[in-house]
Image (cartoon, grey):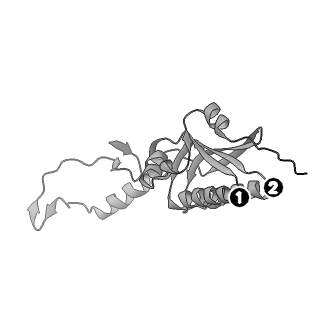
Amino acid sequence: MRVLRCPRLLSLVSDLRAPGADTYNGEEIPHIGYSRQVTHFGTETSEERGIVGLQVSIRQCGDVSILDLLGRSTIDSGESELLSKHLRDLTATGKSKLLLNLVNLAQIDSSGVSIIVEMYVSLKRTGGELKLLSPRGRVLDVLTVFRLLDVIPSFEDETNALASFQPRTCSATR
């Protein structure tokens, strides 16, 4: 159990508790003491956990574009749209081999999953590839629930992931 200090909530709770409010329907409630701490069960915000909005850095390894994702990809603050924009920009410039490094992605919701699936399908139709690298924690749980790891190739090691991309073959016509 994680105990967090939340001054705004504590002030609201203390305002609701009037002096002498240790009774309920006329019966005295044993005083157990009040703490200036509030217990949250998985409801703390991403900011309280130190998770930042989505940050994307892109690097190249041969003809594979690696997107390193940091933070969260959710609909509430538009982070998923940022991921979509980066993916669209890469494919618009002719990149067709994408590796999403998820090791530092702390959270993903259905909007982020939808963007990954759309890009996977789009690339597959045009002969491209999208693969996942090192999903962890909640991200791994979400991808497992959606059964995406059965469809989209996923790797724990970057070297193996890069080696899995098919080299482009050139064909000459006479």
Looking at the rendered structure, the secondary structure element under dot 2 is loop
Residue 47 visible, this angle: no
Looking at the rendering, in which quadrant would you find the N terminus? top left
Instruction: Say which amino acid is labelled 1.
Output: Thr
Q: Is residue 33 above or below residue 155?
A: below
The one nearer the camera, 55 or 62, is: 62
Residue 6 part of the magenta-drawn span? no
Magenta residues, dominant SS class? loop
Image quadrant of residue 154?
top right
Distance from disc 2 to disc 1, alpha carbons, whole Å, reads 14 Å
| Mark before the other along the chain sequence, 2 or 1 | 2
Residue 126 numbered mark, or none? 1
Residue located 48% across and 51% down the image:
143
Locate residue 44, reporting x and y percent.
43, 51
Locate residue 163, reporting x and y percent.
66, 34
Image quadrant of residue 111?
bottom right
- In this view, the mark in front (2 or 1): 1
The one nearer the camera, 113 or 74, is: 113
Residue 17 visible, this angle: yes
Neighbours of disc 1 within 10 Å: few (<14), some (14-19), many (20+):
few
Residue 163 falls left or right of residue 61: left
Instruction: Say which amino acid is labelled 2.
Output: Thr
Furthest residue toward left: 27
Provide the residue span drawn in magenta. Answer: 33-37
Residue located 72% across and 59% down the image:
88
Furthest residue toward front: 174
Residue located 53% across and 44% down the image:
50
Residue position for label 2:
93
The one nearer the camera, 14 or 93, is: 93
